[in-house]
Amino acid sequence: MRVRKLILSAVALACLIQAAKCIAQDSPGQSSPDQPSPGTVRSPKPDFNKEIYYKNRIDFSFESGWLPKNIPFIFDFLLGDGYNLTPLKYTLVPNIASLRWQMDSVRGPWILRGNWDLSFSAALVVIPRGPETHYGAYMMGIRRNFVQPRWRIAPYIDGRLGLGGIDAKEPLGVVFAQGQDFTFTLNLGSGIRYNLNPRYSISAGMHYMHISNLYLSEPKYLNYGINVYGPIAGIEVRLGKPHHGSSQ
């Protein structure tokens, strides 16, 4: 009997101790180990864009577009021309391989927050519509990435200038075709970039391409030029090691 009473007393004492612990944890002055106290301030989530946009990052990008819309040269007003179109229509399919060098880290106020990258590009342009068949060019340009904290999507605008060669057909008697092989090119674009992770991203946007010989073929052959725009899409891959311990 004494042993049984001792056992019952020990069980009752254990229950009382456990109940006291529960009451103490639920009291206003105490906090559960699994829950932060009311005064605890949670730190914000880290901005993963710091692993994507930073000074001296190098990317390789490849873009391909379909440019079927013919328009006048967008800067005709600077040349005193009348925004005229020729009867000859073109469709260009640019394939552009680039090295992109981010020149700075993200900075700037609110909607303008972002960074700049410099691009060095080689372009092979197929011409499925038009008297010429192909165009090759080397281009350099600059892009502004608009980067918001913890956004995977980043809008961009860019511009590129270059020089190249086309199989000109006006010297062969094709009216309104290109007047000589050596030409210059101007490219302008805007779109969005979606970052899959710190190493890979994809992009899509609209692209304008101008090709002309800057009147070098005149007066023998007129400089009509090509001015087209359309959609473009691409992929970018980081070259080199990750930044600040990124695992990607």
Image (tube, rainbow, N blue to C red):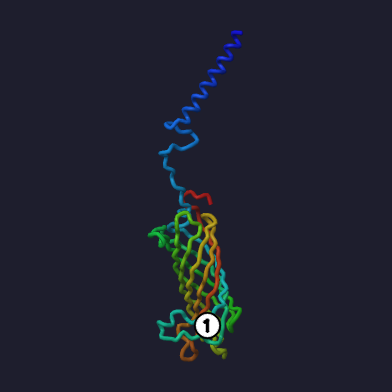
Q: Residue furthest left?
A: 109
For disc 1, the marked residue is 181
Q: Position of residue 213 (x, y in %)?
A: 48, 82
In the image shown, does 146 or 183 lie closer to the viewer? 146
Q: Position of residue 76 (x, y in %)?
A: 44, 82
Question: Residue visible at 43% across and 38% down?
Answer: 38
Quadrant position of residue 42: top left
| Left or right, residue 66 beside residue 29 | right
Q: Is residue 7 above or below residue 48?
A: above
In the image shown, does 90 or 154 lie closer to the viewer? 154
Q: Is residue 90 above or below residue 202?
A: below
| Left or right, residue 216 beside residue 90 | left
Residue 37, can we see it? Answer: yes
Q: Is residue 140 above or below residue 75?
A: above
Question: Residue visible at 52% across and 24% down?
Answer: 18
| Left or right, residue 140 beside residue 65 | left
Q: Position of residue 143 (x, y in %)?
A: 45, 66
Q: Secondary structure at mark 1?
A: loop
Q: Residue furthest top?
A: 2
- Disc 1 marks a residue whose amino acid type is Asp
